[in-house]
Image (spheres, helix red, strand yellow):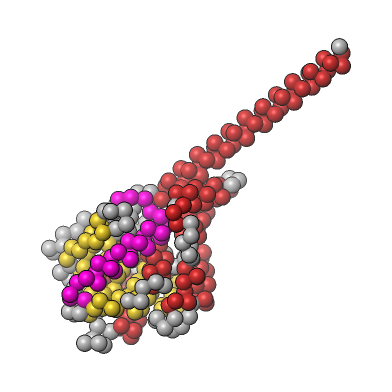
Amino acid sequence: MTILSKLASRRKQLAELFTGILVLAVFGLLSLSMVSGFLLYQILRPARTPANFDLNIMMGHPQTFSFSVSDGGQREGWFFPGLRRAPTIVVCHGYLSQRGDVLTLVTALQDHEFNVFLFDFRGHGTSLGVTTLGYRETQELESAIRTLATRDDVDTQRFGLWGVDMGAYAALEVAGSDRRIAALAVDDAYNDPRDMLRMEVQKSGLTALPFVLRAADLGFRLVNYQFRQELPVSALLARTKGMPKLFIEADDRPALAAETRQLFGEAPGPKQTARNGLGYRDMSDDDRKNYENEIVTFFLQNMSPIAHR
């Protein structure tokens, strides 16, 4: 009986130990899910601060121009007219930004007779929804170009793209599949939306907690499961052979700068690179003016509004 009692006592102790470990494991898993889920929610649904503008008093005489998006809704953008039948440059803002943040670049391009178009990506500015850090944004850009090409006052076969981080990813993806893209300038580009997610998670400081990065990445992949076979930018770069490309990197975002540098190295020619100390949004007025002059010069050299009149 003594032996049986000892065995029973030992089994009870092991059962209690196992139960304790199981409780801790479940608690840890729930805590990990809550932390990574909340972090993912913050990244994919950032606070929107739509800028209000009165088009009637804006310089450049912009026009409201709408196009359909893949979810069946409508996206409204601003079309700044240049020379009739001139190429159109689509300006693609970045993550945590909006169309109002890039208006000085639009003005610089329009002053040189380009048509210019810009809009707010999903989850930014005036556009509702949840950002996908590039997947659905690429579809939005494709829809915008397809609809712009139906206008009778633009060159339907020559479009230019400028984009920063998320906008740069979308621009590169579209450039790899649309022959109408005549020139491309990208600033702080990245290869895959999961790369941008990783950078944002690391920026939060929560990667000190075990498995938070992996859990956030898993959640992001599940949310965007329909895009699981989407090719990264690097797989499409070969299709841009012959298209003039400008890759710009900023010293204040080293992770993105490294990805931009790698994409530049893998891209076929013609191509050129530039480097700035700060990202576009954080530049001083003088630095921004110099930057915009560089962008305008690039597009003038490669798709001048008067080249094919």
The residue lying at 67 percent from left, 27 percent from top is 19
Residue 273: image x %, image y %?
Answer: 45, 78
| Residue 144 visible to an observer of this rendering | yes
Rendered view: 58 above or below 185: above
Start-end of magenta stretch = 128-154
Residue 213: image x %, image y %?
Answer: 55, 50
Residue 121: image x %, image y %?
Answer: 32, 58
How many numbered marks have been drawn onto this rendered protein structure? 0
The residue lying at 25 percent from left, 76 percent from top is 156
> Which image quadrant: the N terminus?
top right
The residue lying at 49 percent from left, 52 percent from top is 221
| Residue 291 visible to an observer of this rendering | no
- Residue 183 as seen in the image, left or right of residue 211: left
Rendered view: 77 above or below 244: above
> Which image quadrant: the C terminus?
bottom left
Q: Is residue 136 magenta?
A: yes
Q: Residue lying at the far left in this picture: please name it.
A: 56
- Residue 307 as seen in the image, left or right of residue 242: left
Q: Quadrant of residue 91?
A: bottom left
Q: Nearer the viewer, residue 31 or 129?
A: 129
- Residue 105 as seen in the image, left or right of residue 208: left
Q: Quadrant of residue 304?
A: bottom left
Q: Nearer the viewer, residue 280 or 246?
A: 246
Q: Is residue 40 magenta?
A: no
Residue 54: image x %, image y %?
Answer: 16, 59
Q: Nearer the viewer, residue 67 or 289?
A: 67
